[in-house]
Amino acid sequence: MKQIYFDNAATTPVDKEVLKAMEPYFLVEFGNASSIHNFGQRAEAAILKSKDIIADFLKCQAQEIIFTSGATESNNTVLKSVFVDFKGHLITTLFEHPAILETAKYLSQNGVDVTFIKPEKNGLIDSQKVLKAIKKETRLISIMYVNNEIGTIQPIGKIGKELVEINKKRENPVLFHTDAVQAMYFLPMQIDRLRVDFMSISGHKIYGPKGMGLLYIKDGLKLKPLLHGGHQENGARAGTYNVPGIVGLGKAVELLSKAEHQKELIRIEKLGNYLIEKVMELEGVSLNGDPQNKLPYNSNFLFKNVEGESLLLKLDLAGIACSTGSACASGSLSASHVLLAIGIPHEEAHGSLRISLGKMNDKSDIDYFLEILSKSLTELRSFSPFK
Amino acid sequence: MYSKEVLEHFKNPRNQGQIDNPDVIGQVGNPVCGDVMKIYLKINQNSKDINKSKIEDIKFETLGCAAAIACSSVVTENTKGKTLEAALKINKDLILKKLGGLPLPKVHCSMLALEGLEKAIKEYLAKH
């Protein structure tokens, strides 16, 4: 049976070049980067090289980067460090990834004043609403760069720019963090354009290894470590350096700066637009999020009178892997918090399906998908009491 | 996450569809929760003992997840041809056994299918 992977926003495979770069660091160059001897020095050199590659890509300094186990750790580090005393005010949004949302709720339960900005119906955060929510006690704003479920691109650069002006008049500046996991592969990432103080990145969304991420911390700012222990990362993050992971992440980022990557983005953008055009020709379907301000590679559709998990399984039985924000697939019983946040009613939110494209996909995959999708919708709708 | 029995019923649901001129219909669930089940019954009335009337035909329509569809299928399969009193004795454990178990968050689907059946039968009994 044909196997098609349409869930690249959940995770991507490791690129062959990334794997090749990592391999020696398991078997031959296995030294602990904190050791003084030659094995350790070679491991340390590999880490520094990775940092240089990434710093070059983000247009920041190498010492502004710390490696983490992934974006969940990066996000937790920022929020729990800025609010280590459980005081002050945090601004975030209602449709963040759980790694922010749940951390913000934890802070809120312990005394932090948290404002959750509601996204607009088009899946975008209104920058003015964010800026208006700033109070004297505000310490941090945390907003995702691209929403993981619907692919909408948030105005990070715009908020960052205005915040610089606002901070000029403040005694205590409002810090700015973005969870940029879903943007890294697709969008400009230069720190001087985004004007953020902190940024979280994950390896496994960009054809790098799982369990590997980073946190950008603007020069001059200091965060309390989430993990206490050794003096790695200048005391910012304890734990033996994951050298193969770090080398893999560096390689994955290096590939993003190559000319082939720009060609690949154009290729999958065309595929994504073709997919949207064809799916929208079907009956009882709508696209979530503003088409002009979303990534064309990540599309979330609502299908009328179909339950998302049933549809997901029908597609899976035909070899197509995608995802749904449907409650029934997630183990909880409430519908996707993202779709509810943008004002989709519960009864409609259950019928969602997310297709996220990647390197491995081509037009024949989409044509096969369209054929199976159309059949599955007809069948599932025939099961439904609503016609 | 699903057993092969659940997937089998999901792929080939038994008694799916509508009955023309049914004697009673039971509908449960609501679209807000994501699951709606509609059970149609055609009943061969026993004039001596109404409880011994037989379910001549049963069909379902379900908007819901794979577990909801599979549960609807199993409930109809195990009640067709049975008397009303026998049908009312079918419980969640039997449905779960026939389906080779359900993931914990899905167990409520089996309850919902039984509620639909019970609602239809009780409505029929109240009318006759």
Image (cartoon, rainbow, N blue to C red):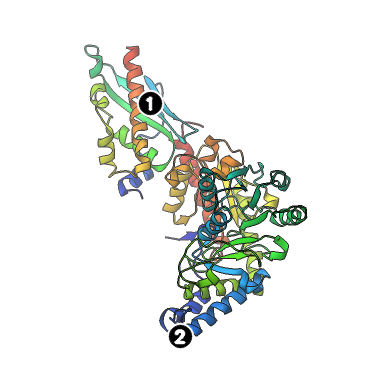
Q: Compared to A233, does A291 lie above or below?
A: above
Q: Residue at x 38, y 26 (%)?
A: B40
Mark 2 secondary-structure assignment: helix
* Residue A293 rendering spot, x and y as whole percentages: 69, 52
**Number of callouts in the render?**
2
| Residue A44 seen in the figure | yes
Q: Residue at x 42, y 34 (%)?
A: B62
On whether disc 1 and disc 2 are found on a single subunit, the reply is no
* Residue A384 rendering spot, x and y as whole percentages: 46, 34
Q: Amino acid at mark 2?
A: Phe
Q: Nearer the viewer, residue A81 or A91?
A: A81
Q: Compared to A163, does A383 lie above or below?
A: above
Crowding near the residue tagged with mark 1, few <14, some 14–19, many ≥20 C-alpha atoms within 10 Å: many
Q: Amino acid at mark 1?
A: Tyr
Chain letter of disc 1 in the image: B
Quadrant including the N terminus of chain A: bottom left
Quickly name the residue at label 2.
A39
Crowding near the residue tagged with mark 2, few <14, some 14–19, many ≥20 C-alpha atoms within 10 Å: some
| Residue A6 seen in the figure | no
* Residue B128 rendering spot, x and y as whole percentages: 32, 12
Q: Compared to A229, does A180 lie above or below?
A: above
* Disc number for residue B40: 1
